[in-house]
């Protein structure tokens, strides 16, 4: 109700009341009645104003009360926020009275440090006195800036009462009087230890091989660089780059989980021989690397030999005894190289040499071989383009009947005509192709070319069986058999005109060899075991496999019949092979007396320079198919 309405209402009510009273009750003259009505109306207006004013004041009081309640709630909220800041455990507010050297802190410092308020009161420089010694200069520099009137930020490490270390970040602000003199320093300090620990965990994960928990390649290279820089006078560092020889076989036969356990056990074995403090790493896949400091080269060699010999003992994985060996390449700082890249390169090259020498051995970098290493790198690089530039060619070496001297078949042998280096022997580039993984593509090219040539001769009416060497890497390609079958179908040749030569080592594991050999047998392809006698198998083992021919290695033929021991050995191989139903082919026949000796003892087929060197297609056709 507004003030005007109240005044009109009360004035009207009293005026009407005065009129009725004067006119009907008092019987007064007309002018008196008018005066009474006017007076009553005026009084009513005053009463209405008073009543309205009272009501307005009451409402204002009510509003003021509610405002006060709102202010109190707001103040309570601010107080809660201040309490949260004051009592938090990850940061603390502090102030220092410069004159009295009194330190006032929020409870965060108590919870963080573990010291009581009394201990803090007694030491106003507590974050300096308890700072990590190496960081005290940071604390001093910050407070010097604050006392000079500058705002300052800094990070350092603090010793907590329980002996652990906290990482803190502090921001300070100087308070000055009217004369510009610093009278108080205030600030806030945060504990960011968890942030540092998280970053350290992420860094450790990024620098650690998750399987073995050894450092990884990135961390090793960084640490090795530092180690070379701080090497003492006379100190040398042997870089051992080694490869687990049979891990791929274990992965395929027993699963990757078993292979991973072997890697873990090897990682545990390394510190047992080279020490926990020695820098070592899993360098990737089945490769490890060790940076072993030494002063005595002979003692270093002995340590490596002891490590090698430890692999004569089996690893026990899932109740199975597993034997593996390692091939090691060693390069030394500063004798062989003075920087990380060169040292790694030479150790890696030496490892490859160890693998070429039959694995399970140690090779040391030899400076005289540097030119050979450059040539090997050139060959590895140029192999990638040799197929595209049609630099390969197949030669054919006849397999001859020792009875009639007539051709019985031939072996396809690859030749590389390098445009700059000239003729490169297969003995040189095939191992490099195997190590670099390029043997798969090269091997497939050889198969295609050989099958194509067989098809040409077959259609010309001069069918001849051609044997092709196939590497273990080709057999490991999942679709090798499908691709071989497709080549045979597209060529239209009888499968029996194709022979596949496998090394003895490739069929050493019967469980792995049987599926491959029986698939070849199902296709109708003839199977040869090449270089027999140089591997680990026996004729008894080979008898369990679907094999057609055994090729006696040329190293046995070389000294017969003059060498009685070799002659006896060859006789034994021939006799056992015949008894087990194999056909035999002798390799490397170079003299007539060798051919006669073999024939007299029951071997009826052979190949070698005595009959013919490997020949290009045209010369081969002219001599044997013309």
Image (spheres, helix red, strand yellow):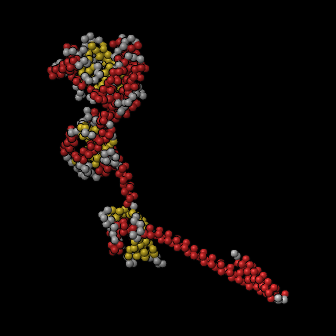
User: What residue is shown at x 34% (from left), y 23% (from top)?
Assistant: 520
Q: Is residue 417 above or below residue 199?
A: above
Residue farthest along the left direction in this orientation: 564
Q: How many marks?
A: 0
Q: Position of residue 515 (x, y in %)?
A: 32, 26
User: What residue is shown at x 36% (from left), y 26% (from top)?
Assistant: 443
Q: Position of residue 282 (x, y in %)?
A: 31, 44
Residue farthest along the front direction in this orientation: 25
Q: Is residue 68 above or below residue 217?
A: below
Whether residue 556 appears in this view of the structure is: yes
| Foreground of the two, 48 or 615 | 48
Q: Quadrant of residue 254?
A: top left
Q: Is residue 610 above or below residue 148?
A: above
User: What residue is shown at x 29% (from left), y 19% (from top)?
Assistant: 548
Q: Quadrant of residue 51?
A: bottom right
Q: Position of residue 375 (x, y in %)?
A: 33, 33
| Foreground of the two, 538 or 27 | 27
């Amino acid at each position: 109700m507004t003030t005007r309405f109240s005044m009109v209402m009360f004035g009207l009510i009293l005026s009407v009341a005065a009129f009725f009273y004067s006119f009907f009750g008092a019987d007064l003259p007309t002018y008196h009645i008018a005066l009474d009505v006017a007076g009553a109306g005026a009084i009513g207006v005053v009463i209405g104003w008073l009543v309205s004013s009272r009501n307005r004041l009451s409402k204002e009081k009510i509003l003021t009360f509610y405002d006060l309640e709102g202010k109190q709630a707001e103040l309570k909220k601010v107080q809660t926020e201040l309490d949260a800041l004051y009592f938090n455990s990850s940061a603390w507010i502090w102030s220092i009275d410069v004159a009295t050297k009194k330190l006032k802190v929020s409870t965060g410092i108590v919870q963080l440090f573990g010291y009581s308020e009394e201990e803090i009161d007694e030491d106003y420089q507590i974050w300096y006195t308890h700072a990590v010694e190496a960081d005290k200069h940071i604390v001093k520099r910050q407070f010097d800036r604050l006392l000079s009137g500058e705002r300052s930020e800094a990070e350092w490490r603090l010793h907590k009462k329980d002996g652990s270390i906290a990482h803190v970040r502090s921001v300070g602000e100087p308070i000055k009087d009217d004369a510009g003199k610093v009278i108080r320093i205030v600030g806030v300090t945060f504990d960011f230890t968890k942030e540092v620990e998280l970053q350290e965990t992420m860094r450790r994960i990024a620098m650690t091989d998750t399987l073995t928990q050894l450092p990884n390649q990135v961390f090793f290279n960084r640490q090795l660089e530092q180690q070379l820089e701080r090497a003492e006078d006379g100190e040398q560092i042997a870089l051992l780059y080694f490869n687990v020889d049979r891990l791929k076989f274990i992965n395929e036969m027993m699963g990757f989980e078993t292979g991973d356990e072997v890697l873990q056990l090897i990682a545990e074995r390394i510190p047992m021989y080279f020490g926990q403090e020695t820098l070592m790493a899993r360098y990737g896949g089945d490769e490890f690397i060790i940076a072993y400091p030494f002063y005595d080269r002979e003692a270093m060699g002995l340590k490596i030999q002891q490590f090698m010999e430890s692999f004569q003992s089996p690893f026990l994985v899932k109740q199975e005894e597993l034997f593996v060996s390692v091939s090691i390449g060693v390069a030394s700082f500063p004798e062989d190289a003075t920087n990380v890249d060169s040292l790694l390169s030479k150790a890696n090259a030496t490892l490859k040499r160890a693998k070429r020498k039959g694995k399970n051995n140690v090779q040391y970098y030899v400076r005289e071989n540097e030119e050979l290493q450059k040539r090997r790198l050139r060959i590895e690089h140029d192999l990638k383009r040799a197929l595209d530039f049609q630099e390969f060619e197949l030669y054919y070496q006849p397999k001859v009947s020792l009875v009639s001297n007539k051709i019985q078949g031939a072996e396809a042998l690859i030749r590389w005509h390098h445009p700059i280096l000239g003729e490169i022997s297969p003995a040189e580039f095939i191992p490099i192709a195997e190590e670099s993984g390029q043997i798969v593509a090269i091997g497939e090219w050889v198969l295609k070319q050989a099958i194509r040539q067989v098809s040409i001769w077959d259609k010309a009416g001069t069918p001849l069986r051609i044997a092709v060497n196939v590497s273990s890497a080709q057999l490991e390609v999942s679709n090798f058999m499908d691709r071989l079958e497709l080549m045979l179908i597209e060529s239209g040749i009888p499968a029996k005109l194709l022979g596949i030569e496998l090394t003895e080592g490739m069929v050493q594991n019967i469980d792995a060899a049987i599926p491959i050999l029986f698939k070849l047998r199902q296709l109708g392809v003839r199977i040869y075991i090449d270089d027999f006698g140089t591997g680990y198998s026996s004729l008894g083992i080979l008898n369990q496999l679907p094999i057609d021919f055994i090729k006696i290695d040329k190293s046995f033929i070389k000294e017969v019949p003059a060498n009685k021991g070799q002659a006896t050995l060859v006789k034994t191989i021939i006799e056992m092979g015949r008894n087990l139903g194999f056909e035999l082919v002798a390799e490397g026949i170079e003299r007539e007396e060798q051919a006669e000796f073999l024939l007299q003892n029951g071997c009826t087929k052979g190949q070698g320079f005595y009959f013919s060197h490997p020949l290009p297609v045209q010369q081969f056709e002219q001599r044997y198919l013309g």
